[in-house]
Image (cartoon, rainbow, N blue to C red):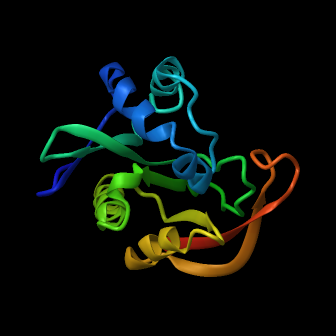
Amino acid sequence: MKSERITLRHWQEKDAEALYRYASDSEVGLRAGWAPHQSEAESLEIIRTVFNNPTTWAIVWNETGEVIGAMGYGPSCDCSLPSRDGEPTVGYWVGKPFWGKGICTEALAMMINHIRETTEIPSLISGHFTDNSASGRVMEKCGFLPTGETAFDDHLYQGSSKPIRVLRLSF
């Protein structure tokens, strides 16, 4: 999938250095719900395991060919989103230098179009930490609607629950 600014392509092992560069930033990972990467080796292992599937893509900045983030959908995460049977969870992030440029909105719109054209998935679910309203705006720009529900993430925050605003897109 390609636009003028970005390309969504499957992850490659050679992307480990770029993944580590952005995924080691504590502000990036914690806003997205995962711990910052501690080494390039850890980033490579994430590429080989978590990102090694047909519904997760690297976001590539076309101007430089550099991987700057990730976009994907799949089974519900560990954050207790109230997903329906067969309803995948959407997740995305970009490196901090690319925040506020509309890249996640562009990538999410591309992925939604891909899902509509290639699957029979009836709806998608996602959420954002309530202190990360920019992520919510990305979802809303792409047609996600708030469900009024709140989920909680306990696994990264040493037992303290962090609220997640839940949104859904129905096709």
Q: Residue at x 28, y 64 (%)?
A: 106
How far from the left and from the top, in percent, is residue 14? Answer: 31, 20
- Tell me if residue 167 comes above or below residue 80 in the rendering: below
| Nearer to me, 148 or 32 | 32
Q: Is residue 124 visible?
A: yes
Q: Residue at x 38, y 61 (%)?
A: 99
Identity of the residue furthest to the top in this view? 41
157 displayed left or right of 73: right
Please name the residue shown 38% across and 73% down the image. Answer: 142
Q: Residue 27 at what x, y percent from top left?
A: 55, 52
- Residue 171 visible in image: no
Front in this rendered view, residue 115 or 58: 58
Q: How many marks?
A: 0
Asked if residue 114 is positioned above or below residue 135 in the image, the reply reads above
In the rendered image, residue 85, in percent from the top left (x then y), is placed at: 65, 56
Image-based side of 91 in relation to 11, left or right = right
The residue closer to the viewer here, 68 or 86, is 68
Q: Position of residue 138 (x, y in %)?
A: 42, 71
**Which quarter of the rendered picture does the C terminus lie within?**
bottom left
Q: Quadrant of residue 128?
A: bottom right
Front in this rendered view, residue 94 or 119: 94
Q: Quadrant of residue 112?
A: bottom left
